[in-house]
Structures are given as C-alpha cells and as structure tokens.
C-alpha cells in the first residue's frame, strides 16, 4: 500500500513538473524543517507506518526534484541554525551565530527584502519564537543570534507583511516581557492577533499582521503534547495563505515556514516527539499543496532543513528495528519529566514519600509502555534500577537531571526514554547538530532549476532568479 501510494504521488508530481517548465513562480513556499536530517524524514515514515500516528508516505519525500545540500558554515563543518538560516535566506555563508551578516559582519539582504523590493507579498511563520534564529534570518541582521530583542526591534520595520510564531523571546536581564514587544508592534501599526479564532477575518485586515499562539509561551507546544485549544503551525500557514492571497494574489508572494521544534526533539534525543513534530510540519505542507493544486502553473514549493540534529540512525546496533515500540509514548520527554516530578517529587517537602521501584516502573509502564508492550531485558532493567537508586536511594539526588539545549529532564525519564528509543531501533549519537547534508525537495513551477543545487547557499539566489525578485 505504502509503495503504491508513493509511486502514485511521485507520478503526479513528475507530471506537474513536466507541465510547469519555463514559467516564473508567482507564489513561492519555502519550508524549513529545523534539525530535519534525511533519517528524521525516513524515520518518521517508518514510525507512522508502524503506529498509524501519521501518513506512511511523507508528502514532500515524493517531490519530483530531490537532492542533498551541504550545510557547512564559514566557522565550522557543523553549522548552527543562525549560519544555516542566513545561508538559506541570503545565499551568503557566514559564521555560526550570525544572523543576516556575512563573515565580515556586514549586513547581507535576504529573500523577504528581495521579494518586497519587487512588490511581492512576504510571510514568515514558525512554531518557535518569531525572533528565533531561522525566522530571524528572514527578518533581521545582527552579530549574535541571542540578541533576541535587537531582532524583535528590527522586525518592527522589516519588510514582512505576515508573520506568525509562538511569541517574542526576551533576554533574561532586560526586564522586558513578550507583551512589551507586542505593544511595540501595535505602535508600529502591526495588527497583533492571538489564536485561530482571531485569525478568521485575517483576509479583511489591511496593513501588516502578526499572528501569535494566544498563550503565554514563546513557542508552540510539541505536537505530541498538544491540547485541543492549542494553536498549530497549520493554523499559521492557513492564516498566512488567506492573508497573502487577499492582498497579493495579483502580484504574488514569498512565504517562509519553519518547523522549528523538530530540532528540539533531536536535541532531546526524543524520537516520538521529533517524528510527530515532523508530521505536523508535513501537515502544514499539505496546505501549500492544496494551494498548488489550485494554481499549478504559478506555484513553487521547496522543502529543506538547516541541518541535522542528534546524529539520528535508523538502527541501534541490532539488525532490526521496531518503530511500533514507540506507540505507547503519548507525550514528549519534557512533558513526561513534568509529570514525573509532579507524581514523585512534590514541591512541599513534607508531602514527599520515597517511591518504590515498582511504582516508578508502573509510571513508565503507563506512559511509555515499558515492561508492557515493550520488553525490558535484564541488563536494561538493572541499568534503569541503578538510575532509580541514584535518584531515590539514601545517597541519591532527587533533582538529578540531564540538560539538553532546550530543556532539562529528570535523569530517570531521560534514561527510560533513551532505552525506549534504542529498543525501537532509533539510535542517537549526541545532543547537538551534525554536519550531515540534508534533503532538498522541490515541486511545482521552476522546480527543475534546483536539480543542480548542491549547497544551502545556492537555494535563495535560485529562488530570486526564477521568481524575479530584486537582489
Ligand atoms: Zn538546534
């Protein structure tokens, strides 16, 4: 079934590629999966097929033009999201941590600026903060990606008609709240909308708009942790398409969309969170594909990544994989840590009762399927018990945690999720980025021009040339 579906999709895309040759793309969608290496894409497909939690064929993996792009920065073979974002947005390589500057720290213009200079509508959407590295590369120019407030301030005058994200990230010691920057946006004449209810009449809005999650957070929750009333990346993309179509149907538009938290799942070595995030990203791409079906001769869709995160392997030492073993995990490692702490480590010391190993086992049986649908062999059982003693034993440290770039998790939860990933056949090498090339997947009008693209810095100039932007 999966193979037939794949072949059908691929044929559809190949036919449309043949039909579109020669014309200039009027509507450009540029999807960037942060931390989305090729193994994340194939891994998500295997996970989906085994668990039914998403489509067994990842839509963009069937695009007619597929290749690999290298991601190196000027300072390292292993890029960060800032240098990669800058290369993807401006076509210029720079050092890790730089946003919109070249290696000599001089500002370089980006796709939003080029598109706007030629009269096109522009959009930027992300699941993380609007001033986080990837969206920032399409908005701002600053020496260090951590200059969140400088980036937020530059957003106020950036040539971006539609923007959407979790919210503004603030700097620790500034004393500013995200609301401070929302007010600044309103004062700059930008309509600030919170949550899908307020996005509904977006087409009738004039002037610039900023769509936020509507909750006090600077990124959307992981897809795997989502509640009914949470805003999704698809909400943002759907609002963006409505808005850009209402104002720029005649001239055309450029729309960058980032799946920002595929990367967080990688940093945490949490395959289920990573794959469900990737599924969510693919759902947002479905909206662009719907648009493309209505405007097949004028729409170009690109999907790529800024880098790979985690050194993910399909296989973890045995000649077999069991992605179905991830079926029992229904929340991210971060959410599981919060629940673990709530269950076993009450804030009030007087309420604390040392949990037994059996109680801790029952917790992971319920929330991960360990010792239930997923067998825990003797060696692993012993290793997990050892972690248990290091936390809850007489000499134990109850708050023992493991840090990754975006979160701090209980050592017990990290060990349990780590074992589950390994048992499922997903092997993680580390908690940082790797220098692996990433995929480039292209369909629609002008897609054939990307056949020769080999490096991430070649993408932006190729888009600009095809679409007629002013560089
Ligand atoms: Zn990262």
Image (cartoon, helix red, strand yellow):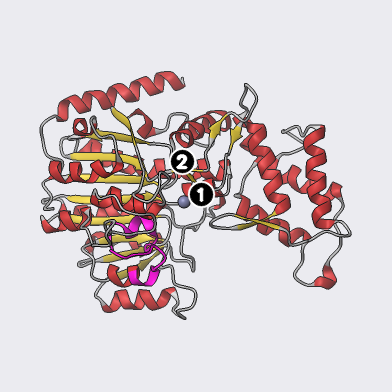
Res 364 quadrant in image: top right
For this orientation, the residue located farthest to the right is 394
Res 96 quadrant in image: bottom left
Does 162 sit left or right of 166 as displayed?
A: left
| Among the two numbered marks 1 and 2 on one chain, the one whose residue lies closer to the N terminus | 1
Mark 1 and mark 2 in contact? Answer it, CB < 8 Å.
yes
Residue 330 visible to the viewer: yes
The residue located at (49%, 58%) in the rendering is 229
The residue located at (48%, 33%) in the rendering is 39
Does 456 sit left or right of 111 as displayed?
A: right
Q: Which residue is mark 1?
A: 223
Within 10 Å of disc 2 (Cα), the crowding (few <14, some 14-19, many 20+) is many
Cα separation, mark 1 vs mark 2, equals 9 Å
Q: Foreground: 254 or 2?
A: 254
Residue 69 point in image, percent of width and height: 33, 36
Q: Main secondary structure of the magenta part?
A: loop
Give the label on residue 279, or none. Answer: 2
Q: Secondary structure at mark 2?
A: helix
Q: Is residue 171 above or below residue 16?
A: below
Q: Inspect the magenta stretch and tell me whether residue 359 lies in it.
A: no
Magenta-colored span: 130-150
Q: Foreground: 34 or 296?
A: 34
Within 10 Å of disc 1 (Cα), the crowding (few <14, some 14-19, many 20+) is many
Q: Foreground: 103 or 387?
A: 103
Report the number of discs.
Answer: 2
Res 452 quadrant in image: top left
Residue 200 visible to the viewer: no
């Amino acid at each position: 079934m999966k193979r037939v579906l794949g072949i059908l999709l691929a044929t559809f895309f190949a036919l449309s590629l043949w039909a579109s040759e020669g014309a200039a793309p009027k509507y450009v969608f540029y999807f960037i999966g942060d931390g989305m290496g090729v193994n994340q894409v194939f891994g998500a497909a295997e996970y989906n097929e085994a668990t039914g939690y998403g489509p067994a064929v990842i839509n963009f993996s069937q695009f007619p033009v597929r290749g690999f792009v290298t991601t190196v920065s000027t300072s390292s073979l292993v890029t960060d999201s800032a240098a990669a974002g800058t290369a993807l947005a401006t076509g210029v390589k720079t050092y890790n941590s730089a946003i919109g500057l070249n290696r000599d720290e001089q500002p370089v213009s980006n796709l939003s600026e080029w598109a706007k200079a030629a009269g096109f509508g522009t959009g930027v959407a992300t699941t993380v903060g609007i001033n986080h590295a990837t969206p920032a590369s399409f908005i701002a120019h600053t020496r260090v990606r951590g200059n969140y407030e400088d980036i937020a301030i530059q957003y106020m005058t950036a040539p971006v008609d539609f923007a959407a994200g979790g919210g503004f990230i603030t700097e620790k010691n500034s004393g500013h709240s995200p609301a401070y920057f929302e007010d600044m946006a309103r004062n700059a004449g930008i309509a600030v909308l919170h949550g899908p209810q307020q996005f509904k009449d977006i087409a009738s809005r004039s002037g610039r708009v900023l769509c936020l999650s509507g909750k006090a957070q600077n990124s959307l929750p992981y897809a795997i942790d989502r509640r009914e009333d949470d805003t999704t990346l698809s909400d943002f993309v759907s609002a963006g398409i409505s808005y850009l179509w209402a104002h720029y149907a005649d001239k055309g538009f450029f729309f960058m969309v980032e799946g920002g938290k595929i990367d967080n799942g990688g940093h945490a070595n949490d395959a289920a969170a990573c794959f469900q995030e990737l599924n969510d990203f693919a759902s947002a791409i479905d909206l662009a594909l719907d648009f493309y079906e209505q405007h097949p001769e004028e729409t170009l869709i690109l999907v790529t990544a800024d880098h790979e995160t985690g050194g993910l392997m399909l296989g973890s030492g045995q000649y077999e994989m069991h992605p179905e073993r991830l079926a029992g995990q229904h929340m991210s490692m971060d959410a599981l840590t919060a629940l673990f702490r709530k269950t076993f480590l009450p804030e009030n010391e007087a309420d604390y009762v040392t949990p037994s190993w059996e109680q801790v086992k029952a917790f992971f049986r319920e929330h991960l399927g360990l010792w239930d649908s997923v067998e825990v062999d003797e060696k692993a059982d012993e290793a997990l018990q050892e972690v248990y003693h290091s936390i809850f034993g007489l000499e134990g440290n109850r708050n023992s945690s493991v840090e990754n770039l975006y979160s701090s998790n209980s050592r017990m939860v990290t060990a349990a999720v780590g074992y589950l990933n390994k048992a499922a056949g997903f092997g993680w090498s580390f908690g940082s980025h790797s220098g692996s090339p990433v995929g480039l997947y292209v369909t629609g009008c002008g897609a054939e021009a990307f056949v020769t693209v080999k490096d991430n810095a070649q993408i932006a100039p190729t888009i600009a040339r095809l679409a007629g932007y002013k560089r």
